């Protein structure tokens, strides 16, 4: 990866410079230099505007009106409406917070969507004699930006410009504005919106290290390796350890069934030996207990706690916290420009675990969240073993959750769920019924921030082979909001004129 979720809209000192011929009229937006009391804005005929007062220009600048609204949107703007759903005009005291051309930010917070700014600019002088004028915006954003102007003739927002660049000092958007279309009664209406990166054209492939920024490895259902083929288990963890640097492996997930028979110490010893390869290589990782690990409905965690309890992980910088001795736990990972919370549910999710998970996710709303379960969904798309509860009670209310990983059943499938204005990927994968307990296949999730995608690969170091299942099921691309969980849009200059 070369993001409801909490997002921030940063409005820096907003400066409107209106250039008419050789005459410069400068309005320092949101600056309280002997400000006059708010006055009624000259709203164009036939246009409705919320009852709110514009900020007036200091006397030296002439009577130029400015109004600013902020809001959030998960998808497209409301093209036929000046006002956008949920928008709010900044309060008078918020205007007063910014008193100079300095980085004294006005901050508004949203969750799970993308910020926008809407600005009405009312000029003192009439530009109707001019055919066109130039609009410029300067500022910063950690997502692509779309610039819109309200077209009075068509009665809709028209996109004037789009920029792929993100958080860059001095970033500029500019576009020619047709005065008869975009001005009415000396007022122009501008909308700047952060947007998600479009990554639908990226093809599935086995990427080279230069194609991505970091990798998350994912193992599951290694029980038959611990039982009969421990060398295959170790080949997987050895591969992850040996390729930590060149494949940029930042973290490893194990979604349970570490062993086949939870009461057999020799199997736990084999699993422990294989996973210690990651310990020695200092590869951050997390595990959970599957049904085989806890003797199915007996829910006997004795050996799991002995070998993979909290004691094994406590003190590691990435270990966030656990419930009931690592029955459930979460890790906090930083990779590339993003921060993640990777949260694990042990076998048999109950209400206590759901409450714990919600508390943890709400504590870290700015981190992108991956949930890990042993059983959650099957290849038919049916939720199993509490998966439906996790969807309704954890995934839907926590907008930073974007992915779920699980195993348990033999097979593989990937589901894309649309929840309001966000996407959640459900990844189900397991090769345990293949020869030799699964033939050593595991998943590599390569994150490419520049293009906003995750390359998903399936590989066996035992066979040195890619793809156990059909290629389209084992090798694919997931679009991914590559920007950090917090979206940032900072305006420094809005300019009309040459």
Image (tube, rainbow, N blue to C red):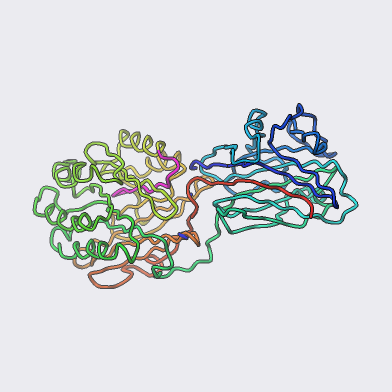
Is residue 54 located in the magenta-colored stretch of the structure? no
Which residue lies most toward the top here?
Answer: 37
**Quadrant holding the C terminus:** bottom right
Expressed as whole percent of the image width and height from the top left, the position of residue 442 reads 29, 62
Which residue lies most toward the right here?
Answer: 129
Q: How many marks are shown on the rendered structure?
A: 0
Would residue 189 appear left or right of 141 to someone viewing this image? right
Check the image and report above or below for 15 versus 351.
Answer: below
Image quadrant where residue 84 sits: top right
Check the image and report above or below for 29 versus 20.
Answer: above
Image quadrant where residue 221 sits: bottom left
Please name whichever residue, 123 or 28, is drawn nearer the observer in this view of the structure.
28
Expressed as whole percent of the image width and height from the top left, the position of residue 405 reads 35, 52
Please name whichever residue, 54 or 152, is drawn nearer the observer in this view of the structure.
54
Q: Which residues are magenta?
A: 364-375
Which residue lies most toward the bottom here?
Answer: 464
Expressed as whole percent of the image width and height from the top left, the position of residue 66 reads 74, 38
Please name whichever residue, 283 or 180, is drawn nearer the observer in this view of the structure.
283
Q: Residue at x 47, y 60 (%)?
A: 2
**Quadrant holding the N terminus:** bottom left
Would residue 260 appear left or right of 45 to someone viewing this image? left
Expressed as whole percent of the image width and height from the top left, the position of residue 296 reads 19, 45
């Amino acid at each position: 990866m070369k993001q409801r979720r909490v997002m921030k809209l940063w409005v820096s000192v907003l400066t409107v410079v209106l250039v008419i011929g050789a005459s410069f009229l400068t309005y320092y937006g949101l600056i309280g230099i002997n400000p006059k009391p708010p006055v009624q804005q000259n709203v164009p005929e036939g246009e409705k505007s919320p009852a709110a007062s514009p900020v007036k220009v200091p006397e030296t600048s002439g009577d130029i009106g400015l109004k600013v609204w902020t809001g959030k949107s998960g998808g497209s703007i409301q093209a036929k409406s000046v006002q956008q759903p949920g928008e709010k005009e900044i309060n008078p005291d918020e205007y007063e917070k910014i008193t100079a051309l300095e980085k004294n930010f006005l901050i508004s917070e949203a969750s799970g969507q993308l910020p926008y700014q809407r600005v009405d600019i009312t000029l003192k002088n009439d530009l109707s004699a001019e055919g066109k004028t130039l609009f410029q915006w300067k500022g910063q954003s950690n997502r692509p930006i779309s610039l819109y102007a309200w077209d009075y003739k068509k009665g809709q927002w028209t996109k004037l410009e789009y920029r792929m660049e993100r958080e860059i000092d001095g970033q500029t958007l500019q576009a020619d504005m047709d005065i008869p279309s975009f001005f009415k009664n000396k007022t122009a209406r501008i909308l700047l919106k952060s947007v998600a990166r479009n990554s639908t054209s990226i093809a599935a492939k086995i990427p080279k290290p230069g194609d991505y920024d970091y990798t998350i490895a994912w193992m599951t259902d290694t029980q038959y390796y611990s039982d009969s083929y421990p060398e295959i288990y170790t080949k997987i963890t050895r591969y992850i350890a040996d390729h930590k640097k060149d494949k940029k492996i930042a973290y490893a997930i194990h979604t349970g069934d570490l062993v086949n028979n939870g009461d057999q110490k020799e199997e736990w010893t084999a699993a422990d030996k294989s996973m210690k390869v990651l310990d020695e290589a200092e590869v951050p990782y997390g595990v959970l207990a599957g049904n085989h690990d806890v003797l199915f409905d007996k829910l006997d965690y004795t050996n799991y706690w002995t070998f993979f309890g909290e004691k094994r992980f406590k003190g590691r910088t990435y270990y966030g916290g656990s419930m009931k001795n690592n029955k459930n736990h979460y890790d906090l990972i930083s990779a590339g420009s993003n921060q993640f919370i990777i949260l694990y549910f042990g076998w048999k999710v109950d209400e206590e675990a759901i409450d714990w998970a919600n508390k943890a996710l709400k504590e870290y709303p700015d981190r992108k969240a991956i949930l890990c379960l042993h059983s959650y969904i099957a290849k038919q798309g049916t939720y199993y073993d509490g998966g439906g509860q996790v969807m309704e009670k954890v995934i839907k209310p926590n907008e930073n959750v974007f992915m779920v990983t699980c195993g348990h059943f033999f097979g593989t499938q990937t589901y894309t769920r649309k929840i309001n204005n966000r996407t959640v990927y459900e990844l189900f994968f397991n090769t345990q019924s293949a020869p030799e307990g699964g033939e050593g296949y595991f998943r590599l999730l390569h994150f490419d921030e520049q293009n906003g995608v995750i390359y998903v690969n399936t590989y066996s170091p035992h066979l040195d082979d890619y793809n156990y299942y059909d290629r389209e099921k084992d090798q694919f691309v997931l679009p991914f909001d590559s920007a950090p969980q917090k979206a940032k849009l900072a305006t420094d200059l809005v300019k009309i004129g040459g």
